[in-house]
Amino acid sequence: MSVKAIPRPSAERRISLTLRVSVLLVFAVVIPLLITVVGSELILRPTLITQATTEMGNAAQSHQQTIDSLLIARQQDLGILDQFYAVQQFLSGNTIYKQQGLDELALGYHMDVNYSAWTLFDTRGQALLSYPAFPSLRGNYTIPPEIMAQVKSSRKTLISDVYFDDNTHTAFIDIYAAIESPGAKLLGIGRSTLNLNEIWTTVNDEANSVPGSYAIIVDEHGVRIGYTNIDTTLTTLPQGLFKAIGPLTSQFQQSIKDEDLYGNSHAAVTVLSDPVLVQQQQNVQETSTFQFVPALQNEVFQAYLVRCQVVPWSYIVLRPVNTITEAANRQDLYLFSLAAIITILAAILGLIIGRGITHPILGSVSSLIKSSEMLKTLAAREQAMAGEQKWIVESSQNGLKAVQYYAGASSLAAHKLGEIGQELKQNLERVDARKMEQRLNEIISTARYLEKAASHQEKSGESLSTAMSITSQVTDQLLSGATSASEAAAQLEEVITQLRHVVGE
C-alpha cells in the first residue's frame, strides 16, 4: 500500500499563526481605542465645544458688564452736578458763582481721562459754562431737540447716540442730566462728553483671545459703533465701523444728517448687510448664540450676543467655528495618533509573540516530518518484504501441489503393482514356480515399499502444507503491519498538515 505525499496548504488559505496572533493583538488594542474615540466624538467633543462656547459667552458678558459699569459710573459722576450749590446758584443767574461753578466742572472732568468736556446749558439749550472749552455743535444743534425734550420730561440721565470726531479719530457720547433746584425746578442741563477709547480698547482686545476672533458693538439703530481694529497703529478704521447691518428708517437717516452722527459728514453711513444680525437684534432674549458667515468674512463664525443694560447696545463676540472646535479637533488628533502608534507597537509585539509561539511548533513539525519519512521508508520496506514472502509462499504452494500429485500417482502405481503381483501368484502353475514366486515376492515388496514411500510423502506434504499455512499467516501479518505503518504515516502526515495550517506554513 503506497503512502500519500504530504499535501501543502494552498497559498490562498495560508495565513501564518504569527500574522494571526499579531492581528488578534492589534484588534485587542484597537477596539478599546475605537470605543474611546467614539466616546470622545459623542461625549467629550460636544462637552469641549460647549466649554469653548461658554468661555466665549463669559468673555462677552464680562466685556458687556465692563461697559455697563463704566457708563453707570459716568452717569453717577454727572449726577452730582445738581448737588453743587455753586452750580445751582450760577444756573439761577447768580454770576458770582461762575468761577466756582467752572471749578466744579473741572473737578468732574478730571474724574476720567476719557472725558473731553463738561458743560452747563440753560433750559433752552444755550451753553453757559464749559470746561476745558466750549464744545462744538452736534450737527445743527447744541443739544438735539429729541434729547432736550426727554431730559425736561423725564428728568433722568440720558446717553446720546455715538458721534465721531475725524480730527482726533475718536468716537464719543454725550451724557445728559437735569439740574434741579431744591424745589425740583429745572435750572439747566449738565452734559459730560465721554470718549469711547476705553470701550474701543475692550473691543480691540478680543483679537487677542483666539486667532481670527473679533467683536462688534451694534446700537439700537443697527449701526456698528464698535469694531475690532486689526491695525495695531490705530491710524485706520475698521472697514465695518459705522456701517449699518440693515436698512435704516428714513426718520433716523434724517437724524444722522441733522446731528452728524457717526461722523456722517466725513464718511456717509451706509449699509453693510448682515441679515442674521438683523434677525438677532429683533430677538428679545438677553443673550443668544448662533453661527453664520458675517459680512466681510468668508467662513462660518460662532457668535455670542449679549445686550447691555445701561444703553441699548448689543455686544457680540465672533470666533471662527474651527477655533471653537480646535480643542476637540486636537484631542481627536492626539487620540488617532496614539491609536496609530499603539496599533503599530501591538502589531510588532504580535509578530514577536507569534514567532515565539510558532518557532517550537515549527520545530515539532520538522521532527514529525522526519518521523513520517522514516515510517514511510519502513512501510515501503515491509511492503517489499511482504511481497517477496508472498511470492515464496505461492511458489511453495505450487511445489506442494506437485508433490501431492506425484505422491498420489506413486500410490496408485504401487497399488496396481500389488494387484499384478497377486494375480501372478495365483497363476504359479503356469510358470516356473520358484522363480515366479521370487519375482512376485520382489514385486510385492516393491509395491509395499512404494506404498510406505507414498505414505511418507503424504505426511511430508501435510507438514509442508502446515508450514505454508503458517508462512501465509506471517505474510499476512507483515502485510497488515505494513498497512498499519502506512496508515500511521498517513495520519501523521494529516497531523503535520493541520499543524502547517495552524502556523500558516
Image (cartoon, helix red, strand yellow):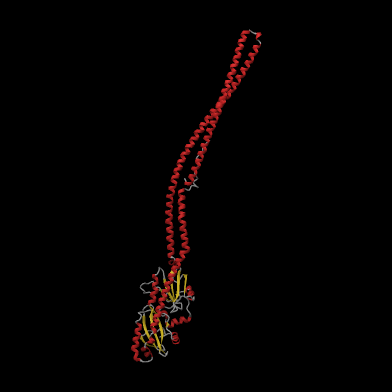
Q: Position of residue 15 (x, y in %)?
A: 48, 48
Q: Residue at x 34, y 84 (%)?
A: 107
Q: Position of residue 459 (x, y in %)?
A: 57, 22
Q: Is residue 356 visible?
A: yes
Q: Nearer the viewer, residue 271 or 217?
A: 217
Q: Quadrant of residue 442?
A: top right
Q: Residue at x 40, y 78 (%)?
A: 69
Q: Quadrant of residue 322?
A: bottom left
As drawn, 2 above or below 94: above
Q: Determine whether, in the image, residue 460 is placed left or right of residue 220.
A: right
Q: Residue at x 34, y 90 (%)?
A: 97
Q: Position of residue 371 (x, y in %)?
A: 47, 39
Q: Nearer the viewer, residue 104 or 448?
A: 448
As drawn, 311 above or below 452: below
Q: Is residue 131 visible?
A: no
Q: Residue at x 46, y 56 (%)?
A: 30
As drawn, 289 above or below 183: above
